[in-house]
């Protein structure tokens, strides 16, 4: 994914999506994936300009593994909170992949409907990735 901007990049034409994807690729080697052998790296920009990243961490009890987005959101809160503004996750080859359902919910909670996500079909707002989402406002 080098060269041309991804489809949907016009939502934030000045944003460097390739640099964000490169940050996700850079954390792939930190993933702990002895069972699946499928490392995932994630990177996001925060509304104050910080970069947060995450990688997946598996467990012998398969169901309690942590997706890369879980680590990213943990780093977001550990380093001061804020709102995610731009997000991408990649597989071992550096190809963009879609977050699972649980992780889409995490991204919604921490970025909201206007969070821009690079997806397999271009850059989309989270309200396109997770339409009619359930979130904090539903609990008020």
Image (cartoon, rainbow, N blue to C red):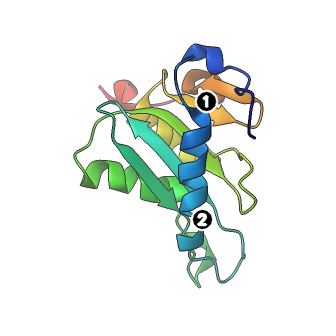
Quadrant of res 28: bottom right
Give coordinates of residue 63: x percent, y percent.
Answer: 60, 71
Quadrant including the N terminus: top right
Give coordinates of residue 126: x percent, y percent.
Answer: 56, 27
Residue at the far left in the pictured view? 80
Checking the image for residue 36, the label placed there is none
33 relative to 50 in the view: left or right:
right
From where the camera sits, is residue 137 visible?
Answer: yes
Which residue is drawn at the image coordinates 58% and 71% (left, top)?
Answer: 29
Circle 2 sits in a helix, a strand or a loop, which is it? helix
116 to 87, vertically: above or below: above
64 to 85, vertically: above or below: below
58 relative to 48 in the view: left or right:
right
From where the camera sits, is residue 106 visible?
Answer: no
Give coordinates of residue 41: x percent, y percent.
Answer: 58, 58
Which residue is drawn at the image coordinates 56% and 41% (left, top)?
Answer: 19
Which residue is drawn at the image coordinates 52% and 20% (left, top)?
Answer: 14
Front residue of 13/54: it is 13
The alpha-carbon separation of the residues under discs 2 and 1 comes to 25 Å
Mark 1, residue position: 130
Front residue of 17/96: it is 17
Quadrant including the C terminus: top left
110 to 68, vertically: above or below: above
| Mark 2 closeness class: few <14, some 14–19, many ≥20 residues within 10 Å | many
Quadrant of res 83: top left
Residue at the far front in the pictured view? 3
Between disc 2 and disc 1, whose residue precedes?
A: 2
Mark 2, residue position: 28
Give coordinates of residue 61: x percent, y percent.
Answer: 58, 81
Quadrant of res 88: top right
């Amino acid at each position: 994914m080098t060269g041309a901007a991804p489809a949907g990049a016009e939502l934030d034409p000045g944003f460097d999506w390739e640099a964000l994807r490169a940050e996700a690729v850079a954390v792939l080697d930190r993933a702990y994936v002895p069972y699946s052998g499928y490392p995932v790296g994630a990177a996001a920009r925060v509304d104050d300009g910080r970069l947060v990243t995450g990688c997946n961490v598996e467990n012998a009890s398969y169901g309690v593994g942590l997706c890369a987005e879980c680590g990213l959101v943990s780093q977001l809160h550990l380093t001061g909170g804020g709102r995610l503004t731009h997000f991408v996750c990649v597989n071992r080859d550096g190809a963009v992949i879609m977050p699972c359902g649980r992780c889409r919910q995490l991204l919604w909670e921490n970025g909201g409907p206007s969070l821009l996500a690079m997806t397999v079909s271009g850059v989309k707002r989270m309200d396109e990735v997770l339409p009619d989402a359930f979130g904090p406002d539903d609990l008020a």
